[in-house]
Image (cartoon, helix red, strand yellow):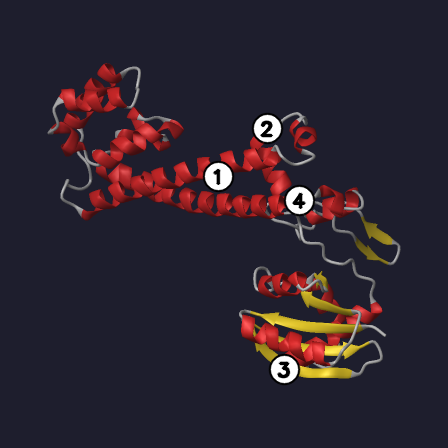
Amino acid sequence: MQYVLALDVAKGKSMVSLISSCGEVLITPYEINHSIHDFTNLLNRMNELKLENISLIMESTGIYHRPVERFFLEYHFKVFVINALYSKMYKRNLRKTKTDKLDCISLAELFFTTDFKEYVKPDTIYLNMNALSRQYHALSEITNNLKNRYKNLVYLCFPEYELLFKGNTIYSDIALSFIEKYPHAELISSTRIDALQNFFKTKGFSHWKSKSIKIKEVAKNSYPSVNKEDEIVSALKGIAKLIHMNQTEINTIKEKLIENGKQTKYFDSINSIFGIGEFTASIIIAELGNINRFNNIKELTAYCGLDPSIKQSGKSINIKGPISKSGNKYM
């Protein structure tokens, strides 16, 4: 006899029910919080039934199912985490009825009628790399938004900065540090040339003399949109500091990713592909995890969302449709 603990997971809580392969409901659906107290009580109720061969099934819900996954894996349960889209297709019916209790029953029925692959917790190194990858993408997105605001404020406070620090050099460490200290043209005009030269010299800038003289001359002739007392100037100073901090943290994350990536089995193979450097290889490994979990190239392609969409109607088959984009967006 097989038994399955079906959980309909939500944020901070779940609806749970224990059902046998014969359809007998051994634990009537009820709600638990994702706390050690409720998890332990549920485990005790299951132990009182003195059953063997109990599996657990739940939908993958981003981060919300992670506490449940961790608890039951630590107690050596067979855990099955399924794609929410798959279970949604199974739960379609003529009646538009949906409750958490019914979802538990549907998940149990799906478990007994489908052959699922048991969830295997990835090695710690892959979990840590994935956490670093997501932190990298989050900080990169925030930093890109800050850069847009930064460019606008630079134009208002000292538009000639874009000529003095051309292209992406305006986001360099030395440019961010300088703009944080001198966010307005008038501040540069009132600063002695030797102080400006000393700033660039201590930062290791090779042309510190000529750069300081040029910035001083340009600042004297500049007419910004705001005066140096304006709050926009303070905003530019603050955003330059934030971008600098974020970029420093992003560089640290990159170093950690590469360091961890080099410890994995397929790093050298992926890195050997033309056009893929150490960081890109590490990001790929961070998002794919253990590549051996994919049975074939089709599974890997689908996971990346690169599989083509196919539409068929009668004898007409469209095999040149756009890619599905239903996989891992970071990949």
Instruction: Please name which of the two marks, 2 or 3, marks the residue nearer to the observer.
Output: 3
Query: Callout 2: few (<14), some (14-19), or many (20+) C-alpha neighbours within 10 Å?
Result: few
Image check: 205 left or right of 250?
A: left
For the residue marked with disc 4, what is the amino acid?
A: Leu
Identify which amino acid the numbered label 1 is placed on: Ile
CA gap between label 1 and label 2 equals: 16 Å
User: Residue 95: image x %, image y %?
Assistant: 72, 82
When asked about the image quadrant of residue 183, the answer is: top left
Determine which residue is flagged by label 1. Answer: 253
Mark 1 and mark 2 residues within 8 Å of each other at the beta carbon: no
- Discs 2, 3 touching: Cβ within 8 Å: no
What is the C-alpha distance between the residues marked 2 and 3?
51 Å
Q: What amino acid is labelled 3 in the image?
A: Tyr
Please, what is the three-letter code of the amino acid marked with disc 2? Gly
Say which element carries label 1: helix
**Cα–Cα span, label 4 and label 1:** 18 Å
Q: Which residue is mark 2?
A: 277
- Badge 3 local density, few (<14 within 10 Å), some, or many (20+)? few
Nearest to N terminus: mark 1 or mark 3: 3
Residue 86, percent across and down? Answer: 73, 63
Distance from the alpha carbon under mark 4 to that under mark 2: 16 Å
> Which residue is the site of mark 3?
30
Give the x, y percent position of residue 83: 70, 61
N-terminal-most mark, 4 or 1? 1
